[in-house]
Each structure stands twice: as structure tokens, then as C-alpha cells.
Image: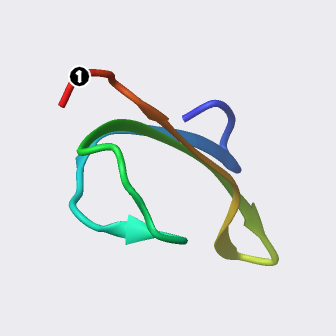
Amino acid sequence: MLTADTALVTYPLSQKGKFKQRRLAPKNYASAVWVKRDGKWQEAAYQEAPLGGE
């Protein structure tokens, strides 16, 4: 929790697939910022970064 109404979530992510004919990185690290608005949690930002390698 960053504040009572803001949270940062980070986690490793494994995936397999393609997007626009390009292979997705198999190992990534994901981050998301969640904000509580009007009593409901909403994702405000999301980012993935490849961890490198195959």
C-alpha cells in the first residue's frame, strides 16, 4: 500500500504467445498501480518489462 487509497502490485509473469506476429517475451516482470475511487478499486497504470533470455 502506498496510501490508504493507492496500491502498487508487482509480480513475475510467464506467458506464451504472439502479438502482431511477434513472439511475446516468455518471462516478464509486471507492475500495476491501483487507486480506490468512489469506493471501488480501479487499475490506473500497468506495465510489463521483459526479464531477458529465452
> Looking at this view, is 45 or 3 the one in front?
45
Q: Quadrant of the N terminus?
A: top right
The residue at the point 64 percent across, 30 percent down is: 2
> Looking at this view, is 6 or 31 the one in front?
31
Q: Measured from the top left, where is residue 21 in percent x and y?
A: 46, 69
Where disc 1 sits, the SS reads: loop
The residue at the point 68 percent across, 35 percent down is: 3
Looking at the image, which residue sits at the far right? 38
> Looking at this view, is 51 or 43 the one in front?
51
Tally the marks.
Answer: 1
The residue at the point 23 percent across, 22 percent down is: 53
Where 25 sits versus 40, above or below?
Answer: above
Looking at the image, which residue sits at the far top? 52
Looking at the image, which residue sits at the far front? 21
Question: Please, what is the three-letter code of the amino acid marked with disc 1?
Answer: Gly
Q: Please name the colour scheme applied to the rendered image.
A: rainbow
Q: Measured from the top left, where is residue 50 in percent x and y?
A: 41, 32
Q: Measured from the top left, where is residue 8 in percent x and y?
A: 56, 38
Q: Which residue is mark 1?
A: 53
Image-quadrant location for residue 36: bottom right
Q: Residues within 10 Å of mark 1 (few under 14, many from 20)?
A: few
